[in-house]
Image (cartoon, coloured by chain):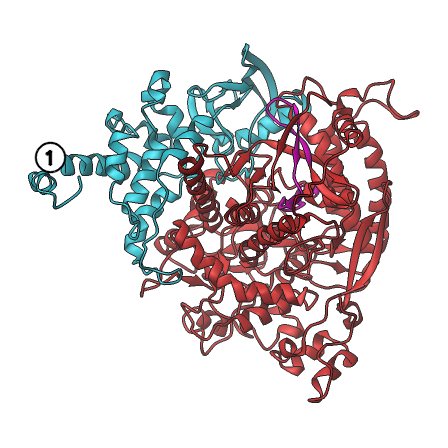
Chain colours: A cyan, B red
Amino acid sequence: MSYQADFKVWRGDTDGGDLADYTVEVNEGEVLLDVIHRLQATQAPDLAVRWNCKAGKCGSCSAEVNGKPSLLCMTRMNTFVPEETVTVTPLRTFPVVRDLVTDVSFNYKKALQIPAFAPPKDLAPGEYRMAQVDVERSQEFRKCIECFLCQTVCHVVRDHDDNKTAFAGPRFLIRAAELDMHPLDARTDRAEFARDEQGIGMCNITKCCTEVCPEHIKITDNAIIPMKERVVDRKYDPLVWLGSKIGLRKS
Amino acid sequence: MSSLEKHSYDVIVIGAGGAGLRAAIEAREQGLRVAILCKSLFGKAHTVMAEGGIAASMGNVNSKDSWQVHFCDSLRGGKFLNNPRMVELHAKEAPDRVWELETYGALFDRTKDGKISQRNFGGHEYPRLAHVGDRTGLELIRTFQQKIVSLQQDDLAEYGDAEARLKVFAELTVTELVKDGDVIAGAFGYYRETGAFVLFEAPAVILATGGIGKSFKVTSNSWEYTGDGHALALRAGANLINMEFVQFHPTGMVWPPSVKGILVTESVRGDGGILTNSEGKRFMFDYVPDVFVDQYAKTEAEGDRWYEDQENNKRPPELLPRDEVARAINSEVKAGRGSPHGGVFLDVSSRLSPEVIRKKLPAMYHQFKELADVDITATHFEVGPTCHYVMGGVEVDADTEGTAVPGLFACGEVSGGMHGANRLGGNSLSDLLVFGRRAGTGAAEYVAGLGDKRPSASEADLEAAGKAALEPFHADAQTRPAGSATPENPYTVHTELQQVMSDLVGIIRREGEISEALEKLKGLRVRAENAAVEGHRQFNPGWHLALDLRSMLDVSECIAKAALERQESRGGHTREDFPIMDPNWRSVNLICSLTPGTNDMVLTRKPVPTIPVELLSLFKRSELEKYLTPAELTVLDGPNSSSTVAGEQA
């Protein structure tokens, strides 16, 4: 079953732009990215859009669909009624490059700031032993496909550009949690780093990030809240406080 | 081009998939300044799509595994056409390469005793694939990405500049390699974001651009797989080998269109999934070829027992190498026993509980539920062959990955030889680890050997490269060749190219059709030269595609020419008019090269490198008799025999 559907697609660049109207054929079983590709091939050959795998695994085709941050390849057309006009706009939190393509370099800068995995000094390659149950906690966060939908939806930065310096965003808070929960990571200051350098305190757990995550990572419940608790534990635990005062532990 | 942006590095790596990143890490750790150039954002490479795992004989699940068994499996899978030295290095070094990933922070699934878990896969005798659920490729890319970040953090501490010795230039397309006489001098390309040209001067260039799937209509490959590296190598004077061998993965999704071509990992079969036709029959039992008859179950009951007891039962034929399964599905569909949309049924829902399926195949479950509204725990689904991998590629030296052009290296899918006529699942991730590292070392040694001599690009070559890249903007009436019609839409030309390759040089090939394809490719080449683009140079997909079309056409012509020449059926090359695997062709590699200064593709023959007798002795003679000629086997006859099997040293 095919039908003609109406779309509004944001066209423009750093100098500004506007929504453009298009009518494009939609076929049974298609996703929005299929339709965008048809639009490119038939009406707008220079329409800029990022995509790679078209299978929800690379996180390239992020955009906002009717205002909701989404992957174009995972937005099934049967979730709209044929009469509906579908509006596609670039990610709002990042500067536009052209059309649906945005400058996501913010994320790469934040990635560079997190201290890397610290391998255990006493184990040679091949000697690592970890229980499945222990690696699973970090594995959940390593499912992240870096689509940055959580970054764009997070209101700490979505409406407050000036927070970008102090706040790493959900994607990199789960990276901190992943390393913190890694059974063999030799560093012990992941939670403190999340507090002091990543601005984890700015998150007020509205769970918007969890809601848009295409990998269904429980960003808030399984990463951010445990990390916040660990920060609080360490900071206010009287024994830890005493230990640090008499030089038994580093805070 | 006086205003041209220029960068100078020791090594340029083109491609940021597993092979490119491993090569870059190695070159950087050897002390070189390295730039990585990639068409997409950093971390989006097609490697993220690899599902099953990394083949390495660590023996964590079955201690009988060894590099020798892995060697034999890979050679058998490649129908003995592989470069034996590459297969040997690959089998020997893969375990170290996997363990190394753990020191970078990778988190593989574990065995009960805490080691890296290993799973069964088609063509591998023992459970061998290190994996992370069914998203192993993503783990690999993320691990390398994070290792690169860690090296950049070291440089930030040491030099105050994170990118002092290792920098990623994302969303950048290389259109031409530049040379200084006979040797590599760098790479010329443009930023996709701005369309501005840029030159990278470097004495060593490592190609790690992946495959060619976008030349075919149904493919599991991403848009980046346009054969750029293959084409760049050809134009620079390197050779392509084995291009007729294209792997069609047997189980791509056939329906709905949102997921057409997307892979259903082999693990679905490894974990119990079965293939049935429209009559409900498990047809793979009818398609076990003679060479595999001793290794596979003859009854459904035995095949089913194998999942629980692999010591005492043979594996079910659903786990035959990919080429065999793809051909079988093709035959069933042709015989009218296919599914409604032209595939067959793959079913895991009647074999495992929904909980187990979700646990073992989480990404599969999730992907098809969300992308296609298909629940693999509740229903069978339609699958069919999808273009997945090219075994052929740039001819390289097994130890250094150097090509015929000094300073040019290639690793990963873009290189050829390792997988022979057919690649085993799991061997591509290990390939890119082993040979990515070796390419990094090879390039480092080459650069060290140059001393202070640095090649440089000529101004004329840069002018020409810039002019060629801008042609699609000038395909107007004045510049078009006489007699040609209106400017072409690059998207239309691309679609027609895919149709030609799929219809005429696809899974089953015939002489007449391949010849027809070669004629049509000539016409498409003229039309591609007329491909015109609208708009300007800033992030313009129409322009990008018009340029990529050149590479796709070069690669397609190589595939068709080699497919026409090889008059036998072997692995990823099936000729209906020559259905037999012929031992006399076993020792022949077909080489594609360009006559310098022209677009003329020439095809020559070269012997496959000989298999040393000590490696040949790992096989039973009865098995070798199925692949090698009697003359080649005489080497095994006596203690005084020569140490090589018939064929020239190559």
Q: Chain of mark 1?
A: A
Q: Is residue A199 visible?
A: yes
Residue behind mark 1: A236
Q: Residue at x 27, y 34 (%)?
A: A194
Q: Which image quadrant for residue B61?
A: bottom left
Q: Give the quadrant of the C terminus of chain B.
A: bottom right
Around disc 1, counting alpha carbons within 10 Å, would you say few (fewer than 14), some (14 to 19), or many (20 or more)?
few
Q: Is residue B194 magenta?
A: yes
x, y percent for residue B234: 76, 45
Instruction: Decide which of A106, B530 is in the foreground and name it.
Output: A106
Direction right: furthest residue: B482
Q: Residue at x 57, y 38 (%)?
A: B35
Instruction: Decide which of B280, B619 is in the foreground and name it.
Output: B619
Instruction: Decide which of B18, B265 is in the foreground and name it.
Output: B18
Q: Give the quadrant of the N terminus of chain B.
A: top right
Q: Which image quadrant for residue B221?
A: top right
Q: Is residue B379 above or below residue B88?
A: above
Q: Secondary structure at mark 1?
A: helix
Which span of residues is magenta-colored?
B187-216
Q: Is residue A56 magenta?
A: no
- Please state if B636 lies on the left or on the right of A121 as rendered: right
x, y percent for residue B332: 65, 58
Q: Is residue B282 visible?
A: no
- Please state if B645 lies on the left or on the right of B160 as rendered: right
Q: Residue at x 28, y 52 (%)?
A: A183
Q: Is residue A223 above or below residue B572?
A: above
x, y percent for residue B411: 62, 51
| Type of amino acid under label 1 | Tyr
Q: Is residue A201 above or below residue B102?
A: above
- Please state if A214 lies on the left or on the right of B555 as rendered: left
x, y percent for residue B91: 55, 66
